[in-house]
Amino acid sequence: MAGLIRTHHGVTPTVAASAFIAETAVVIGDVVIGEQASIWYGCVLRGDDNTIRVGARTNIQDGTIVHINHEREGAAGTKTFIGSDVTIGHMALIHACTLEDGCFIGMRACVMDGVVVESGAMVAAGALVTPGKRVKRGELWAGSPAKLMRTLTDAELKYFGYTAQHYAELAASYLNP
């Protein structure tokens, strides 16, 4: 483990021993990062006022910001849950939403409060998914604001698994040079 791991209000992030946290990443507060996950250069995961969870083998690529909504009771979309085997492209903004296992978020995408991206769904590079939307399994959403563009191909869905595995292997090479 590298990066800046910072306690906030007495809560220290929990990072699995097999996870890779790049030296310039910052992880703050109520954050749990799963086995073989990777948090790349320049990322910020700021669980200073609510919960962030990152599943196993998920890769959060360079420059991505993951944050929460400070409201704790009665507000939909306050915590950020990122499942296992998720790929989040460079410079994405992930805010108080749920990314289910095996979904794919493109570079510079913005996924806002209360959004659910289901397993096997994709948010395209540069997309803006506005609050409360649901990106369903097998769908590709793109645009600003994002909307359903088309159904994903079998080859695209297969690529999601390849990408998650590739980044888990790449992260391991950083842990054991």
Image: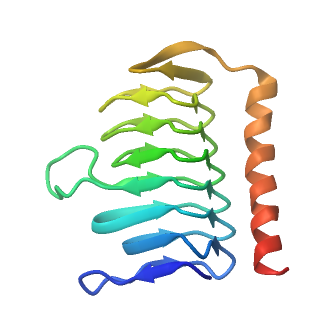
Q: Quadrant of residue 68?
A: bottom left
The quarter of the picture where residue 80 lies is bottom left
Q: Which residue: 35% across, 84% down? A: 7
Residue 132 rendering spot, x and y as whole percentages: 30, 31
Screen quadrant of the N terminus: bottom right
Residue at image point 68% right, 20% down: 152
The tally of labels here is 0
Residue occupying the point 63% across, 34% down:
120
Q: Is residue 95 above or below residue 153?
A: below
Residue located farthest toward the top when viewing the structure as drawn? 150
Q: Position of residue 131 (x, y in %)?
A: 30, 32
According to the image, what is the colour scheme of the structure?
rainbow
Q: Position of residue 32 (x, y in %)?
A: 47, 71
On the image, the x and y values in percent for residue 160 come to 73, 39
Question: Which quadrant would residue 159 be assigned to in this image?
Answer: top right
Give whichever of 133, 48 is nearer the camera.
48
Q: Is residue 171 left or right of residue 142?
A: right
Residue 90's place in the image compared with 25, above or below, is above
Is 112 situated left or right of 166 in this image? Answer: left
- Vertical position of residue 109 compared to residue 35: above or below: above
In the depicted structure, whether residue 37 falls above or below residue 6: above
Image quarter of the C terminus = bottom right
* Residue at left offset 62%, top offset 24%: 138
